[in-house]
Image (spheres, helix red, strand yellow):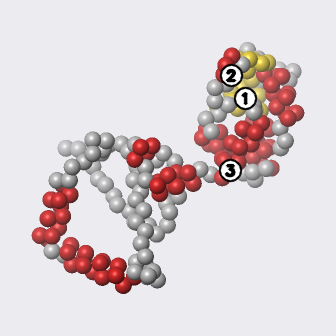
Amino acid sequence: MAQSCCFVFTTNHLPLWIEAEDRRYYVVEVDHGGHASGPQAAHFAALVARLLDFLADPASVKRLYNALIERPLPETFSAKTLNVERDATDVMRRIHDSSRQVTVDQLEEHLNDQEIGALPEANLVEFVRTSLNGNVNSIRHMMAELRWSKSKAKWGGVDYARAIWLKPGYSVDRGKLHGPNGFEEPITDHLSKTEADITL
């Protein structure tokens, strides 16, 4: 027999640990003035007391259960997956928008400013270390989040392959960088311009 479970968590703080597009959590914001120093503290305390009295009676719990079990569900509801694009609440959108690390945003902005299709890993390491004050071991995670891919190529007269990162939609083959809309350029030319133009 298949088993399943559902947990309900409450928190006084915005759960920013939830990652963007995480489908495991449906977050509902229940803000009110009934906190200890709020303008409706006494009213809310009385409401909680009535609720506890209600739940202490098994017959009341049964009526609540019957009401919930008979509640019609919308056709878009799925118990197996959460469509965060369609069904996210306002607080979920705030959480998802805030979940990405600041360093990833800064790196993405910098890469977009350069208008490049490929970048030597050595340049990237230097930028992350000096400009972002980041851990270079986090590069692979940040670049994966930005959907860049890592490859090896020879350029600049060196007879051994070196690591480069490729922007989404770009690839390197036989010494040439290929990109969208038929873009093609010798990788040496592209990376020499990149190294000259990028300000680290």
Q: Measured from the top left, where is residue 45 in percent x and y?
A: 34, 81
Residue farthest toward the front in the current orientation of the protein: 39
**Number of the label disc, if any, that sits on residue 10:** none
Say whether residue 47 is left or right of residue 35: left
The residue nearer to you, when weighing 97 against 162, is: 97
> How would you rate the neighbour count of disc 1 (Cα within 10 Å): few for under 14, some for 14-19, many for 20 or more?
many
Relative to residue 31, is residue 37 depicted above or below?
Answer: below
Q: Quadrant of residue 111?
A: top right
Q: Measured from the top left, where is residue 24 in percent x and y?
A: 40, 49
Say whether residue 43 is left or right of residue 102: left
The residue positioned 30% from the left and 82% from the top of the image is 46
In primary-sequence order, the first of circles 2 and 3 is: 3
User: Element under label 3?
Assistant: helix
Give the amino acid at mark 3: Thr
The residue positioned 23% from the left and 44% from the top of the image is 2
The residue positioned 72% from the left and 29% from the top of the image is 117
Residue farthest toward the left in the current orientation of the protein: 59
Relative to residue 112, is residue 73 depicted above or below?
Answer: below
Residue on which disc 2 sits: 179
> How would you rate the neighbour count of disc 2 (Cα within 10 Å): few for under 14, some for 14-19, many for 20 or more?
some
Relative to residue 105, is residue 16 depicted above or below?
Answer: below
**Number of the label disc, if any, that sits on residue 117:** 1
Labelled pair 2, 3 in contact (Cβ < 8 Å): no
Quadrant for the C terminus in the image:
top right
In primary-sequence order, the first of circles 3 and 1 is: 3
In primary-sequence order, the first of circles 2 and 1 is: 1
Give the amino acid at mark 1: Gly
Labelled pair 2, 1 in contact (Cβ < 8 Å): yes
Give the amino acid at mark 2: Gly
The residue nearer to you, when weighing 52 against 47, is: 47
Residue on which disc 3 sits: 103
The residue nearer to you, when weighing 105 against 171, is: 105
